[in-house]
Amino acid sequence: MADYLFCEGTPQEVRDAKGLHLITQNTPNGQATQILLEELKAKYGLDWTTQVIDISTNVQKEEWFLRLNPNGRIPTLLDASQSPPFAVLETSAQLLYLLKEYDKEDTFGFKDEFERNEALQWLFFWHGGGAPYQGQVNHFSRAAPEKIPYAIERFKKETLRVYGVLEIRLSGIYGPGKKPRQWLAGKGDGKYSVADIKAWSWVKGWERTGFTKEDMEPFPHLLKWIDRIHEREPVKIGIGEKYNLKK
Ligand SMILES: N[C@@H](CCC(=O)N[C@@H](CS)C(=O)NCC(=O)O)C(=O)O
């Protein structure tokens, strides 16, 4: 028994978990892991339990949560089928953990080392260079008590720049034969993978982030990629009603 993972305040549903247990809220970060779980369910019949929390109450800063994820942020994944139970923080680490443990056919990852590395490149690119900037646009334009034009402009500009990086990749202009790609990683025009899932969960929210259609005009391949991923049934479920907070 891994006593260190639990304390008096640990909710019963966490203690009762027998397999994978996801603690989330339906935000872009939460959605990345939600989508991969739904994809794995569609492909292999994977099962897990979900606990939707309300981060506006700061429940993610309570001791029971910090024991599972010292960063105090969602999503948090616990795999209670491991002995001792294994807790995973950070979306990209969760995606990689799920690939290793639950995607036995590498459907959403790659067997080939070079392709696998490409997926890591785009995963890290978005984790470190995309999500934090788009997150700051959201913060400074919606949540901040004071509107600071410099901060909003700075983070908008950087977010559009990284959208431009994705556009370069998907348009294929600097790739072999200058052929457009369908997906971020993989040979040829690529294969849908965790790299796409991670970036998509943020980029698809461009309108909500405050960008206009004119802002997005330089990114035609990116816009098509957004629609392509949105058509997948597990993706629709992974960002849908199922993950909304039940009041
Ligand atoms: N780098 C982290 C970021 C997670 C994150 O920022 N989660 C936000 C919601 S999208 C959160 O939990 N915010 C609540 C808080 O900061 O207390 C990841 O990829 O998992």
Image: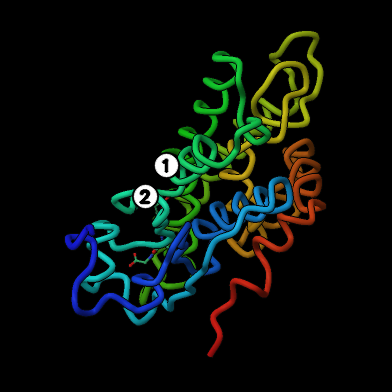
Task: Tell which of 9 and 175 is nearer to you.
Answer: 9
* Image-quarter location of ligand 1: bottom left
Most extreme residue toward the top is 177
Q: Quadrant of residue 245?
A: bottom right
- Residue drawn at x 32%, y 70% is 60
Q: Residues within 10 Å of mark 2 (few under 14, many from 20)?
A: some
Residue type, mark 1 in image: Ala
Q: Secondary structure at mark 1?
A: helix
- The residue labelled by disc 1 is 93
Q: Is mark 2 within 8 Å of ligand 1?
A: no
Residue type, mark 2 in image: Val
Q: Residues within 10 Å of mark 1 (few under 14, many from 20)?
A: some
Q: CA distance from mark 1 to mark 2?
A: 7 Å
Q: Secondary structure at mark 2?
A: strand
| Residue 123 vertical position relative to residue 228 in the rendered view, above or below | above
Left or right of 130? Residue 88 is left
Q: Which mark is residue 88?
A: 2
Most extreme residue toward the bottom is 247
Q: Position of residue 23 (x, y in %)?
A: 44, 66
Left or right of 98? Residue 64 is left
Task: Tell which of 89 and 213 is nearer to you.
Answer: 89
Q: Is mark 1 within 8 Å of ligand 1?
A: no
Left or right of 48? Residue 214 is right
The answer to whether residue 43 shows anywhere in this view is yes
Q: Position of residue 91 (x, y in %)?
A: 45, 49
Left or right of 66? Residue 140 is right
Pointers 1 and 2 in contact (C-beta within 8 Å): yes
Task: Tell which of 111 and 236 is nearer to you.
Answer: 111
- Residue drawn at x 61%, y 62% is 210
Q: Position of residue 33 (x, y in %)?
A: 54, 53
